Image (cartoon, rainbow, N blue to C red):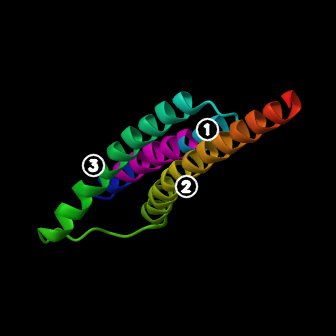
Amino acid sequence: MLDEIYEVSFQIIMHGGDARSKALEAIRASDRYEFEKAEALIKEAKESLKKAQEAQTGLIQKEAAGDRQEVNIILIHSQDHFSMAMTSIDLSEQVLRLNRKIQALEQRESQRNALEEQS
């Protein structure tokens, strides 16, 4: 049983880490106003998070069915990865929205300056 917990834990770590990395990459793309790329990366991050969640759900279902799971540091570490991935995805979506607003404001300011120069 311990081997199964390790295997599931490492699946959560792997997919959660991938999701977090993709989310942070999306933030960097968004900062460059590469919005389509950022959206694609967020989608990839969510797909990786879903894989991590599926692994996690299996453990939860076993626990709920009465099959007690041994908690160890690797399992705890995997839950940290999972939580950070969720938070990173939420953050990347918010940064994307903010960067779109910033770009729109910059474009309006640029247009306003161009009109003033023409006058």
Residue at position x 33%, y 45% in the image = 50
Tell me if 59 is positioned left or right of 20 in this view: left
Mark 3 or mark 1: which comes first in sequence?
A: 1
Q: Residue 25 has which mark?
A: 1
Mark 2 or mark 3: which comes first in sequence?
A: 3
Q: Is residue 31 visible?
A: no
Nearest the eye: 42 or 59: 42
**Up-down relation of residue 73 to residue 91 (above or below):** below
Looking at the rendering, in which quadrant would you find the C terminus? top right
Tell me if 40 is positioned left or right of 105 in this view: left
Q: Could you give the CA–CA distance between mark 2 and mark 1, rounded to whole angstroms?
A: 12 Å
Q: Is mark 3 on a helix, strand or loop?
A: helix
The percent coordinates of residue 98 (x first, y second) are: 60, 50
Residue at position x 65%, y 34% in the image = 33
Q: Is mark 1 on a helix, strand or loop?
A: helix
Tell me if 4 is positioned left or right of 9 in this view: left
**Which label lies toward us, 3 or 1?**
1
Segment tinted magenta in the rendering:
8-22
- Asked if the magenta segment contains residue 75, the reply would be no
Q: Is mark 2 on a helix, strand or loop?
A: helix
Mark 1 closeness class: few <14, some 14–19, many ≥20 residues within 10 Å: some
Mark 2 or mark 1: which comes first in sequence?
A: 1
Please name the amino acid that badge 3 sits on: Glu
Q: Mark 3 points at which residue?
A: 54
Mark 2 closeness class: few <14, some 14–19, many ≥20 residues within 10 Å: some
Nearest the eye: 91 or 46: 91
**Up-down relation of residue 107 to residue 8 (above or below):** above
**Up-down relation of residue 45 to residue 81 (above or below):** above
Q: Name the residue under label 2.
A: 91
